[in-house]
Amino acid sequence: MEAMTFVLFGSTGDLAKRKIFPALYNLYLDQKLPSAISIIGLGRNQMSHQKFQHDVEQSIKTFSRRMDNDHSHLDTFLEAFRYSVLDATKADDYRNLLNLVREREMELNIPGNRMFYLSVGPDLFGPIALNIKESGLGSTNGWKRLIIEKPFGRDLESARELNATLTEAFEEDEIYRIDHYLGKSMIQNLGSLEFSNPVLQTLLNNRHIANVQITASETVGVEERAGYYDKSGAIRDMFQNHMLQILMMTAMHIPKSNSPYDIRNEKRKVIEAVRPIKKDEVSLEIIRGQYRAGEINGSSVVSYRKEPGVDASSQNDTFVAARLWIDNPYWQGVPFYIRTGKRMAKKSTRIVIEFKNSIKTGKSNRMDPNLLIIEINPNEKVSLQINSRNPINGKIEPVNISFSTQQSDIPEAYERLIQDALRGDSTFFAHWKEVEKSWEWVQPILDAFREELVPLYLYPAGSNGPEAANALLNKDGFKWWLDE
Ligand code: BG6
């Protein structure tokens, strides 16, 4: 891999400590970093290089999934780190940063390849990108790249504005928008599953599939993020990005090649084919929920409105379920049900594909349909539910054929994504067109929520969400699978 500088804005923040430093360290242990790399951390407070290296060391010791035994690798790794103080809006600070970047480029013989990772609040994305341009940091003989994380705007208009600013300083193919769900190994496996299994290629379409269900349920509540979450809700926090990305990855047709262009092109065709929803029809297709007090794993938890920092009369959504239609020849007529929520019965991210079922046993149609189940988190597992005769009682019963990956040594999503960005592979990053189309689809829902056109159903913490989310499927003759 080419030698490079990795500039980290927000290097004293939580994400840097928990994810980014451990990811870089694990890549280093696997020899997946370039042999010459200069890593420069930035933050608002003055700090010596040594103190910064010490903090990085602590975060690695606390959060890394592995450690080298005698720490000799860790010591060498830490030598790559330097620190510079930076107020994101002060031009002078960027000039100092440029000097440090150049100095290290000379020392380590780095040919001007510069990665800028913005691990900061979204209001700083625009100002930082412009300052990178104006300070000369972005004018280099090598390549330059920008990594940012969601949220990419808070509605269609602000997302477009943000993108217009970013593209003043970086080209689209220099921008790597992280959606960490795209870094999960089972999500990355979706394309391969279909590509490498002719039996699935034959079956995954509207001739054989009855419906597709995508669930991302969490047991955690709003935690310490009320300030952000109460203004965002599940629709912005999870649905517009992670859930629609899973939808694209699940429904996309096999790309012509494995190139980022072809894969993202197929994803884009999916989001473009999702039937738009009108504001006054939102209440028919979307269920909005908020958790009330309840019990999770034997402990009582308070209602959302009683969480610290949440407005006592908040109408914010902590749960969203939706029915979508993809109007293309493969999926026409197959409902896709998507739901996500906080304080639900269990942590589970999964896709369940239900096959059509015309076999009747006896008088009523009692036989379970075949299901293809892809578990993404916390288990990574693919299983196919088929029916088989129980040799003891003679009944036809569902059984599972399954495959699961060993958990321990799988690289984390951040490791995979950072490595991809370092080598310039944008396959598993969100392209602007995907982001824009996702906001376009979600915008009428945001409007309908704001105008109170959609009921807010309260659901007990520890449940599978409001009853209305069950009714959404029941009216089509289906039910959510794998709910306990
Ligand atoms: C984040 C959301 O993007 O994803 C959080 O902001 C959410 O609210 C998290 O908890 C879930 O991620 P994961 O990987 O635990 O499913």
Image (cartoon, grey):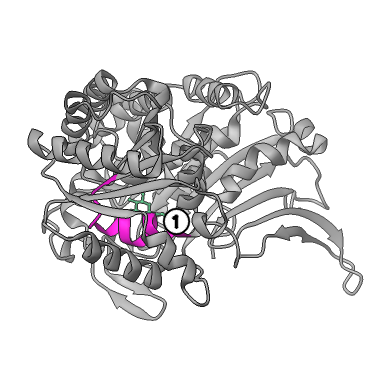
Q: Is residue 25 left or right of residue 359?
A: left
Percent coordinates x, y for residue 303 in the rendering: 23, 65
Magenta-drawn stretch contains 23:
yes
Q: Is mark 1 within 8 Å of ligand 1?
A: no
Based on the displayed image, in which of its 4 quarters is residue 198 positioned?
Answer: top right
Which residue corresponds to the image point at 19% horizontal and 34% vertical from the top-left?
128
Q: Is residue 256 above or below residue 34?
A: above
Percent coordinates x, y for residue 78 in the rendering: 37, 61
Q: Which is more toward the observer, 359 or 15?
A: 15
Percent coordinates x, y for residue 222 in the rendering: 26, 60
Q: Main secondary structure of the magenta part?
A: helix
Q: Which is more toward the observer, 377 or 46?
A: 46
Q: Is residue 3 left or right of residue 79?
A: right
Q: Is residue 161 left or right of residue 267?
A: left
Asked if residue 280 can be seen in this view, the reply is: yes
Give, as a single range, the part of the protein colored magenta: 8-25
Percent coordinates x, y for residue 232 in the rendering: 23, 44
Residue with the most extreme bottom position = 298
Provide the secondary structure element on which disc 1 rests. Answer: helix
Which residue corresponds to the image point at 54% horizontal and 40% vertical from the top-left?
1
Query: Total number of numbered labels?
Result: 1
Q: Residues within 10 Å of mark 1 (few under 14, many from 20)?
A: many
Q: What amino acid type should be assigned to the residue bearing mark 1?
A: Ala
Asked if residue 458 can be seen in this view, the reply is: no
Q: Is residue 34 left or right of residue 456?
A: right
Based on the displayed image, in which of its 4 quarters is residue 112 positioned?
Answer: top left
Q: Which residue is mark 1?
A: 23
> Which quadrant would the C terminus be assigned to in this image?
bottom right
Which residue corresponds to the image point at 30% horizontal and 32% vertical from the top-left?
445
Which residue corresponds to the image point at 63% horizontal and 51% vertical from the top-left?
374
